[in-house]
Image (spheres, grey):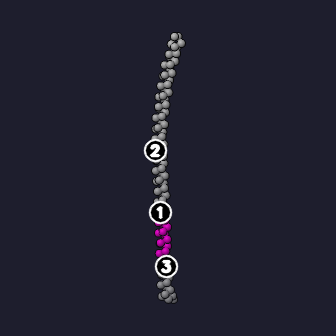
Amino acid sequence: MRDHGQVVHDGVSAGLGAALLAMDAGIRAHREQAAWDRAEARSEAAVHRLGQALMASRAREAELARQLAAARAEVAGLRIRAAKAEARLPAVRRA
């Protein structure tokens, strides 16, 4: 038969072991949650950066569309001027 001291020792050891396992599990769970939180924050930041880049791209696209429209208008004006100048050429040659 085991003596009382051994029984107490075994009980305390088992209790401490269980407490250490519980603490370890808690620490691991906390670290895992922190890792998930960091990953989520990084993904949200990446989505934000992509959104900002998309908005900048759309603004640049709109600016290029305005420049293209202005260039087309200028070309149309130059064509009209050239057509008018060509129409005057025969009159100049006759004179």
Q: Residues within 10 Å of mark 3 (few under 14, many from 20)?
A: few
Q: Nearer the viewer, residue 24 or 58?
A: 58
* Residue 78 locus on image (x, y percent): 49, 25
Q: Which residue is mark 1?
A: 34
Image height of 77 relative to 6, above or below: above
Could you tell me residue 55's position as x and y percent?
46, 44
Binning the other alpha carbons within 10 Å of mark 1 as few (below 14), some (14 to 19) or many (20 upward) gives few
The residues tagged by marks 3 and 1 sit, at their Cα atoms, a distance apart of: 30 Å
- Most frequent secondary structure within the magenta stretch: helix
Q: Nearer the viewer, mark 3 or mark 2?
A: 2
Residue at the (49%, 61%) spot, across then down: 35
> Compared with residue 95, is residue 68 higher up or lower down, i.e. above or below?
below
Residue ID at (48%, 68%)? 27
Q: Amino acid at mark 1?
A: Ala
What are the residue bounds of the magenta stretch? 18-31
Q: Which mark is residue 14?
A: 3
Number of numbered discs overlaid on the protein picture: 3
- Label 2: element kind: helix
- Of 47 and 33, the residue lying toward us: 47
> Which sits earlier in the primary sequence, circle 1 or circle 2?
1
Crowding near the residue tagged with mark 2, few <14, some 14–19, many ≥20 C-alpha atoms within 10 Å: few
Q: Which mark is residue 75?
A: none
Indicate whether 62 appears above or below 48: above
Residue 24 highlighted magenta (yes or no): yes
Q: Nearer the viewer, mark 1 or mark 2?
A: 2
Q: Position of residue 87 (x, y in %)?
A: 50, 16
Residue type at numbered disc 2? Met
Residue under numbered circle 2 = 55
Looking at the image, is mark 3 or mark 2 earlier in the sequence?
3
- Sequence order check: which comes first, mark 3 or mark 1? 3
